[in-house]
Image (cartoon, helix red, strand yellow):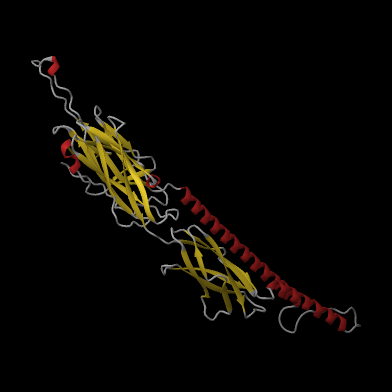
Amino acid sequence: MLRTELIVPDEQVQPGDSLTADLRVWNESPVVDAYRITLLGPPTTWGEPSLGHVPVYPGSHETVTIPITVPSSGDLPPGPLVFAVRTVSTEDPARVDVAEGVLHIGEFQDAEVQLTRERLSGRLFGSNLIILRNTGNTPLRVRLRAAAKDKKAPIALQVRRSRVVLRTSERARVAIVLRAFRPIIVGEPAPWGVDVDIELDGGEVRTDSFTYLQRPFLTKRALKIATVLAALGIAAVAVWISPLGGGTPKLKTESIKGATQEQQVKAQEAKAAAQKAKGKKEEEKKEQEQKKAAEKKKAEDEALKKKPLQQSLYVPVGKNVDTYMVGKGYRLMLTAVQLTAAGPGDATLLLTAGKQVLATTTLDKASEFKLNEPVKVLQEQPLQLIINCPVPHSSASRPPDERLTPSTCTATALLTGELVPLQGPYSKDNSTPEKTGEGKKQ
């Protein structure tokens, strides 16, 4: 009474790619029937498991196209993946058929790389840490190299583990040890840039960098204290060796040329205070930049994201309309429509999106409809499938037992597209141009 066949491409599909499978549904009963189609197995977690309804005439069959997008996930191992499609009769739910298919999942490699510190400091030594995680679905071999950006930089670098093998979802920590072989005794700190190259199995090389700030052994504060102590010592010696008599001796701290020692000390303290204030402003500016970056990341995490849409509009016998409303905060980019219908030749079908008419055709030609270009439907606007099914007039001359009954009309529209947020970082639609189009009119 009911027979189905699932046709899946034999070629290998890489995680992140899409493919289409065809389901053929045969109606071997003597009456018009509609069938509810549901996806079973792992692909149900990748999209909408319900594939809608399809009406089929007695003794004939219909083909339903099933789009499948394989996610890029390390939890999806390479190799064959069995799934199934269940078909249930709406007239008699006891009529059920399940068709199985196999997806051939390919291998893909990917890794997350993170440096724990972008800036570190020291006088002769320093160390940084790289965190690696295998996000692919196959074991990954990683080679690590570290080198100073300036080949003349007086620093030596050593990667503790230059080669790392990671199983799926495994994490590893690798230390980079840095040593300066030319110390700075006094003066300004010297920043040295370091590049870290991470080479994956396939030859892909990712580069990250950090800065090592080599500090002097004698800081500015220590120099100021030494200068003040030296000035006090000179003043004490001058008092001790100065001649007595001729009145109270006066201590002269004025140098032969230039400012006095007291003025020099005050100038140095003022300069130190200015530098301290400048450093504090730079720290506050850096904190504000980090705060803004955190707020931006939080806004991106909380923003609405794009999501695929597979929605069916089904008008059963005795009804004439079915409606789907685009959710608030989203616009729908409708990329494909598949129409199937059953009924007399003079019955008509109308498919609308908001104020746009996408298709108007008779039921016997509904399957010939194809969408020429993507259609944009704004938030809270309806997509409607409407059937105009004529009712034959009964004749007064006919006996009561020969009066005509209403015609049997049913139709299904399988909608495929993408819901795109109206605001936020994911509001830009990069997949298709935002144009409003109309389908073919039969």
Residue at 46 percent across and 58 percent down: it is 135
Decide: is 347 above or below 85: above
- Find residue 41 and report its image quarter: top left
For the residue pair 407 and 260, the one nearer the viewer reads as: 407
Answer with left or right where residue 250 lies relative to residue 109: right
Decide: is 156 above or below 310: below
Residue at 35 percent across and 47 percent down: it is 83
Estimate the x, y position of residue 67 in percent, counting from the top left: 31, 48
Decide: is 229 above or below 112: below
Farthest-out residue, left: 397
For the residue pair 274 and 225, the one nearer the viewer reads as: 225
Farthest-out residue, right: 245
Quadrant position of the C terminus in the picture: top left
Residue at 12 percent across and 18 percent down: it is 402
Answer with left or right where residue 78 lies relative to residue 122: left
Quadrant position of the N terminus in the picture: top left
Estimate the x, y position of residue 70 in percent, counting from the top left: 37, 52
Estimate the x, y position of residue 92 in percent, counting from the top left: 29, 30
The answer to whether one can see residue 382 in this image is no
The answer to whether one can see residue 199 in this image is yes
Estimate the x, y position of residue 359 in percent, counting from the top left: 20, 40
